[in-house]
Structures are given as C-alpha cells and as structure tokens.
Image (spheres, helix red, strand yellow):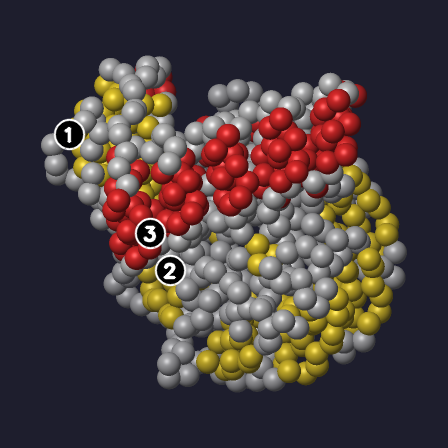
Amino acid sequence: MSSSLRFHIVLTLLCGVGYCGSSLADDSPDELRAAELREAARMGDLATVTRLLDAGIPVDAPARNHVTPLMLAAERGNMDVVRLLLERGADLNAKESFFNSSVVAGALNYKRVEIAKLLLVRGAKDRAAALQWAVENSDVELARTALALPGIEPLDLAAARRAAEEKKDDGMVELLSRASVERRAVPVSVDAAILGRYTGRYRNEQHVVEVQAIENGLSVKVDDAEPLALVSIDPQRFETPQGDFRLEIRGRAGTVEWAVVTRADGEVSFLTLASGAELTGPQQAAEVQLQSGPRDAARPWPQFRGPSATGIGDGQGVTADWDMATGHHVRFKTPIPGIGLASPIIDNGQIFIATAVSSKGDTTFRTGNYGDGDSVDDLSPHSFRLYCLDARDGSITWERELANAAPTVKRHLKSSFANSTPATDGRRVVALFGMIGLLVCVDRDGNELWRRELGVLEANDPQAGIAEWGHASSPIIWEDLVIVQADRRADSFLAAFSMATGEEVWRVPRDERSTWATPTVVSSPLGDELVTNGMTIRAYQPRTGEPLWSLGPNSEVIVGTPVAGEAMVYVTGGYPPVRPVYAIRAGSRGDLSPPANASSSQAIAWSHLKGGTYLPTPLLYRDHLVTLNNNGVLTAYQADSGEQVHRVRLASSATAFSASPTAADGRIFAISEQGDVYVLKGEPGYELLATHPLGEVVMSTPAMSGGLLVIRTLSHVIGIAEDHSPASP
C-alpha cells in the first residue's frame, strides 16, 4: 500500500489519540455520574455500566469532543459493554469532533476487529474505512464483511485494489478482483462559508492541487490538468458527477489541514495545505567559516537546553566543522545501552546521561512525521540508569542503576522510559523517571542522597484516553528547589522539593491533562516567575507555588518549553485547534487572555494564533525568536514586534525534527531525527553553512560547554571539539 494511503488511514482512524476522557467543566451530580459511566465503559465494568444506565444516565453521554461511552468500550475491546450499550440504543454512527472519527474507526485503530465487525453488521456506516484497514492489515474476513454491506463506493474499491496489488497480497487481490459495488453517493448541500474555508493550494512532493469554491461544490485543478467541477457528497467529500475523482478535506478540531485525492485507477495522494509563500531550501552561504569562536571560561550546561533553558552556548568555543566519516574533530563516540531521549547535561568536565534498559531487549522505535498514537508493548522490568562520562574523552566514569522495575504504563513509538533530562546545581544531580514516578538525587560521584516517590506520571492523550505516550517533562533547579511539572492523566500537579533533602516544600494542583513541557523561570519587574506551558499557560511564584497569571487559548497537545527573554516570555503550541506564538510581558497578573480578534494587549506584546511549533522548543537569539517545526520549517520573528522576517524549509517535508534548535557564536544548530545536523547563520537570511550527517537517529537536544558540543543519538553520546583539552570550568 502506498505511504500516502497508509498515512490517510492512520489519520482518519485516530480516535484513540483523540479525546476519550471526561473533562467537562460542569461538575453537577448528573455530569459526575455520566463521567462515571464513561470510565466504567472504558474499564469494562459491566455491572457499573448497567447500574448507571438503569438509573437514567444517557447511553451516549459524551465527553469533551463528543466521545461517547460506546467509543471508549470499543477502543478498549470491552465486547460485553459494547453489546449492552448497543442494546440500550447507543449511536453506533457517532463521531468524535476532534478527528471526525467514528466508533468503527476507533475500534480498528486498536485492532478490535470483532467489535468492528459487530458494529458493521449492526448498521455502522464507516464501511469504506473498514475496507481500507482490512487491506492495510491483510484481513480478508473483515474485507469480506465490509464488501457484503452497502456503502462501499467504486472509488473505495479501486483504491483498495491498487493497495492490495502494491502489497502483493494475493488473497486480498483475488477477493477484491471478484467484488463489485454500485455508486450510491447522492449530492448534498454545503454552506458557502464552509466551501470558502477549503479554498487554497494543497501539495505533496509530486502534486499541486488548486481548490476554489463554486456553487455547492469545488473546482479542483491538479497540476497542469484542466479544472474539474466536483459536487459535495458530504460536507468534507467532493466527487465528479460520474464518480471517478474524489477530493476529501480533512483537519483536526475543525481546522483545514490536508486533502486526499482518489482517482478511478486507485491512485491515492495525500496533500497538505500550503500556507503563505512557497518554501524553498536555505540559501548556501557564500563564505563558510565553521571553526570555533573565542572561548571564554567554560560554563555549565546544567539542565534541558542549558542555562535558564536558553539553548545558547555563546563564548564556549564550539566548532561547526567536523566529519563523522573521517573522525575530524570527533573527540569521542561512546555507546550507551537502552533507549533514552533525555538530553545530555555538562558540568565541571562531567557529562550526565539518563537511560532505561529493557530486560526484554525491546528497542522498538519509529521516527518520522506521522500521527500514529500507538504504544510499544513492553512492560518488562527495566533498569533505570544514570551515567557519568568524562568530557575529555567520553569514557564512562561511573554508572548507577537507580531503579529496576516493571513500568505499569507504556511508551509511545517515538518515546522512551527515560525522556526527562537530568539537572545539576554543580554539587548534586537530580534525575526524574516519570513513568515509574521516581525522583532521585545523587552527588557528583553517583552516591545517592535522597529519593522521592511521586506516583506514576501517566501521560497519554490529553483527554485521558486509551493511548499511552510516556512522561517527558524535565526537572529544573531554582535556587535551593527542584521543581517538577507533573501533568498526567489525572491529578496533575506542580511541586517543589528541597535540593538538599528531597522534602516536599510546596505542591499545587493543576487543571491540566497530560503535557510534555518543561517549566521555565523568567525574571520580571515583580520578581521571578515560574512559567508552565499547557492548554492554559500559567505562571507561579517559584518560592511558594502561588498562581500569578494565566493565558489561553492554546493547543490541545503541549510539548514546547517556555523561553525567557528580558522581562518577557515566549510560549508556543503547535497542535490544533490553535497553534499560537505568544510574547508575554512578565510581571502581569490575572487572566491575560486577549480579547477576541486581538493579537496584543497590555500584557501580551504580540501573538499569532498560527505558526506555533509542535515538538522543538523555540530559540530566542540575537533579537529574533526562531521556531523550528517538526516538518523542518524554520521561521524567524522580530522578538519585540512579532514581525516575520524569515521562513525556510531545511529539508523535505518527509524529514522530521524533534530536537530543539540551539545556537553558539552566531550559528544555529538544527538536527533532524535522521541525524543530519544543519548549521545556519544565526541572523536574518539564515544561510546554510554546512550539513553534517551523524548516521544515527537523534531526538535529544545537544549540550555545549568548554569547547565541546555533545550530541546524544539513540545509541551513543558523541563529543565534537577542535581539541582534546579538558572541558572544565
């Protein structure tokens, strides 16, 4: 099957990533019992579901984004509950509103095939999606079930045949070659305002599709072909009257993000909505100078993204000139067992690395830009370790197993059981393993000083749904406190612990579902403020945890760390329904949310509701806020005004970026998941100076200190330096 069709299937079947919990603000007794019904359906508690339905709780009582108890039961494979809900009149054609995903789609996303068959036989309409899934997974019986029911259009069958042929699935090819279906689609009326939202250019590596609104339909021009007039067969699907060409418009949370084109020959193309000017690769600099700049005294890189989470290593003499193939300026390459996405930190000539080693030996990992929310099925005992490397040669000075335990929650395909970056105050190192709920402090020699059991930080989809993704927020050190942002499936909190003893100093509850962002402390005219990213952006007094201000709207899934400027803090979110970039004046108080349609206020210097980035944290460098999206688009804004001054694509849209950009001595380092390091000028124009392939997967943000650039790959720690002198203060 083509990659475009696989991606289309993943995105259209993603109920599991989407919003299956209870998060309505109304906490009335009826709503609390409706929430209890949803949780009982999710857990397969047939007796409680029966009791609540008998008490009059509506069978389709929806959570946020209209997720129903039937969706939850179907995703978890709770067949008895599914049967009961159907007997009580549950809507088997309900769709949640974030992914516009059906009950059948949610069941199949979690491979609940028997439940999907039951739903189809009972009258569920999502038969085309079931056929696609059956082809993708070589499930002839499910394909036969879908084909036996009305609702498969000729284009659906053509796409399925082509996909089966590409897979060389003889059994499926034979079944589909004998199948025949009738065209049943009937044109429907669609509001002109909705059609207008679909207007624009959609593109992939091969095709460009121009879409214009016409009366009750769309005009579509593919590449240089003549435009086609399409009629609407539902508010998001448009076909030619003869049914030989289809355009589907898709997007999350009611946004317009991508289109899928299906033709009579079975070709399926996935195209993303192009916004703004066409993006090209960065311009190659005319003069390339990669050698290191002047080196000041070595400064520690004590936490995620270094000093105050700036990501800046100016004055550390970091070189941008190396070659992995020849070993030029490669000081060391040290293997580290297990899988860990925690970034390296450096202090006093020591490099600290956290990892988790599976007793099962499972190193399943998948890079790339995809929407699959699947988890890795490895709950075997893991060894949770902290390593100390000598910065002079990369040799392992010591390693400590801080715990050996079997996790009770799973990790995402692009995650690990050691995502949190350690932090150090120069005398002690703290490491957080959120997926077993452990915070540990050791001295510089690895001797344990204290440990705190925080409870499992179960981070999954933000509505407390089915998919388990893994905790990632890193601890930070402020003065004499260790601060942990613990946003999880339930009972989220922010807490501070004594760096000396581990004693809890304060804890405040947070009305947040799972987030993956690390907090930041920013200076303001009224004192330091602890800023946390989330669906609601918030600031706290770091000594006491007292809430200071809040701001919205923000994305549904939060990863990026707030970035501190001079009495300013910059916060981004890169997931629907909004992808904001905020420049917030520190020292403000109360609810800072700007009025509708306003991009600035007394508290907000500037903002954009589009343009925020998803995985990498932005970089504030030389009066510009530089963002890097996970699709490789680098954008620079004037830090004081928000004016966009540069936008460029570093690599093809298929290349993914997770590591946050860093900077040193006028150069920016951006590393793709494939392990290519892009070195750019750190000023308007952002010309490309060099590209250095590492040959390994990189998910972590590098560290810089004392002439040394440290990059962690999935399996090694690499040290880049012009000389082999000690990297000590």
| Residue 440 shows in this picture | yes
Mark 2 sits on what residue?
A: 680
Tell me the residue at 58%/69% (across/down).
Answer: 362
Check disc 1: other Cα within 10 Å, few if <14, some if 14-19, many if 20+: some
> What's the CA distance linking mark 2 and mark 3?
49 Å
Does residue 642 sit above or below 651 in this rendering? Answer: above
Which of discs 3 and 1 lies nearer the camera? The answer is 3
Question: Is disc 2 placed on a helix, strand or loop?
Answer: strand
Check disc 2: other Cα within 10 Å, few if <14, some if 14-19, many if 20+: many
Horizontal and vertical percent position of residue 14:
49, 41
Amino acid type at mark 3: Met
- Dividing the picture into quarters, in which one does residue 726 lie? bottom right
Horizontal and vertical percent position of residue 590:
70, 27
Question: Is disc 1 placed on a helix, strand or loop?
Answer: loop
Would residue 452 appear left or right of 111 to someone viewing this image? right
Tell me the residue at 40%/78% (across/down).
Answer: 324
Q: Tell me, yes or no, whether the two marked residues, 3 and 1, touch with CB atoms within 8 Å.
A: no
Badge number at residue 172: 3
Horizontal and vertical percent position of residue 419:
62, 60
Amino acid type at mark 2: Leu
Horizontal and vertical percent position of residue 36:
74, 31
Which of discs 2 and 3 lies nearer the camera? The answer is 3
Q: First in sequence, mark 3 or 1: give its number.
A: 3
Would residue 436 appear left or right of 502 to someone viewing this image? left
